[in-house]
Structure formats: C-alpha cells, structure tokens
Image (cartoon, rainbow, N blue to C red):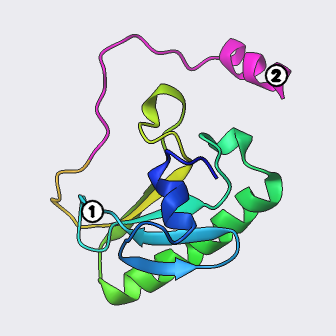
Amino acid sequence: MKHDCDFCKIAAGLLDCKKVYEDDRAVAFLDYDPISTGHMLLISKVHVPDADLLPEEDAVHLMKVSCRLIAAMKKAFPCDGYTVMQNGGDFNDLDHYHMHIFPRHHGDGFGWVDGGLPQECSDEVAEKIKACL
C-alpha cells in the first residue's frame, strides 16, 4: 500500500466510497464525477500505476471482474452501449491502475478527439511493435 494514494486507502477500507464490488484483488466503486449515471472505477488492490506493470494474474482477474460489472451495469441502467477506458503513463492522473466503466447512450456527447497531429498506419509501425513483444 502506498500511504499517500487515495485508491490504496479505498482498497484498504480507509477511505469511503460508493462501493459496488470487492474481492481480495479488486474494488469497484462509483466515480465521484461520473460521465454518466452508473460510471464505475475498477481498481487493483496492488499499487501499480499502469496496466503493463500489473501482475498477470491480477490483470486477468480485473478483466473478468470488468465483464461482470458491465453485465450488471447493463441490467441496472439500460443503455445503448458502454465504454471501458484506462489511461496510462502521464495520462494516469491518479498514479494507481484504474479502469473506467460507464454506460453510453446515443447523443451523450462522449467521443474521441483527434489532436490533429499526423498519424501513421503502416507495415513499419506494425513491425516495430512486433519486434518489441
């Protein structure tokens, strides 16, 4: 546990939240500033900032739990779809692995934003990633 981490405090039961799920590896709770009603955060009880640093068994477990949460969310809040999102590196503003899970509705205004920078989809890009596996 990292003592200055709010998510570690939630995982240890030291900080209050609107908890919807907990087991020995994970906790899910409502986002305090939701994108839509039913927006949840799923966190690992292990303090790591990014998905690629999670122990493999925890990563697999979190994916299984996320599927259960999605099914429950769809029953509780009928929706047109859902989004699962996880930010890493400099874009993980909380420095503790967390996954956003939230219901989506047509016309909800949520979407990807194109930053306008030139991007590339090529064999060279694919080969560069494959070489690093």
Q: Is 120 drawn above or below residue 91 in the view shown?
A: above
Range drawn in magenta: 111-133
Q: Position of residue 78 (x, y in %)?
A: 30, 83
Q: Is label 2 in a helix, a strand or a loop?
A: helix
Q: Nearer the viewer, residue 102 or 93?
A: 93
Number of the label disc, if any, that sits on residue 9 = none
Number of the label disc, if any, that sits on residue 32 = 1
Q: Is 122 drawn above or below residue 59 in the view shown?
A: above
- CA separation, marks 2 and 1? 38 Å
Q: Is 65 inside the magenta-drawn segment?
A: no
Q: Position of residue 68 (x, y in %)?
A: 57, 80
Q: Residue at x 42, y 71 (%)?
A: 29
Q: Is 39 drawn above or below residue 92 in the view shown?
A: below
- Residue placed under numbered mark 2 in the picture: 132
Task: Indicate the amino acid at tag 1.
Answer: Tyr
Please state, as top left, top right, bottom left or bottom right, where the C terminus lies in the image. top right
Q: Is 129 inside the magenta-drawn segment?
A: yes
